[in-house]
Amino acid sequence: MTINGAGKVLNGLNTYTGFIFGAPTQSLTVTDGLTMQNFYTNSSSGSALFISNSTASFAGNVNFLNNTGSNGTIYANSSKLSFNGNTVFSTNTAGNEGGALYLIKLSLISAELPHFKIILLNLAGALYILPAVR
């Protein structure tokens, strides 16, 4: 699935959970200009994105702003994430861990620096990483 940002803003209005995405044969690509903001969840999943057993790629200018949840703005379980371009996480809040990213059993994460920015206004820490059990 491809989401072409093209300057679009997905606004959860502080009420709605973001997107749930996951299947081993599927991939998610988010392209330039997308902002996901004001998503909310009280479940253990991510406020803006829950990704499980999948591949997700973020390219260009992608912003995650003012999202609130229990575990991360993006919750990734057994998934591969790549960030290429200007990706910004700012003013996101997690009740538990990982204000920006909550990563468990992660296969791979790659980020093109210095364009990957986690602004320190994310509450509950910026990253939570739980390695795979072997």
Image: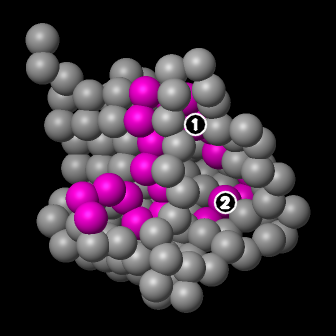
Image location of residue 131, percent across then percent down: 19, 29
* Left or right: residue 103 compared with residue 19: left
Which residue is under mark 1?
A: 56
In which quarter of the view is residue 11 placed?
Answer: bottom right
At label 2, the amino acid type is Val
Is the N terminus in the top left, top right, bottom left or bottom right quadrant? top right
Identity of the residue drawn at 26% across and 28% down: 105
Front-lying residue, 43 or 117: 43
Image location of residue 63, percent across then percent down: 61, 66
Q: Give above or below for 52 relative to 71.
A: above
| Start-end of magenta stretch | 43-63
Identity of the residue drawn at 50% across and 50% down: 20
| Label ID, residue 62 | 2
Q: Residues within 10 Å of mark 2 (few under 14, many from 20)?
A: many
Instruction: Indicate yes or no whether the magenta region holds residue 44.
Output: yes
Helix, strand or loop for disc 1: strand
Front-lying residue, 92 or 25: 25
Front-lying residue, 105 or 121: 105
Q: Earlier in the sequence, mark 1 or mark 2?
A: 1
Foreground disc of the pair 1, 2: 1
- Judge whether residue 94 can be spotted in this image: no
Identity of the residue drawn at 59% across and 19% down: 25
Q: Residue furthest right?
A: 6
- Judge whether residue 78 can be spotted in this image: yes
Is the C terminus in the top left, top right, bottom left or bottom right quadrant? top left
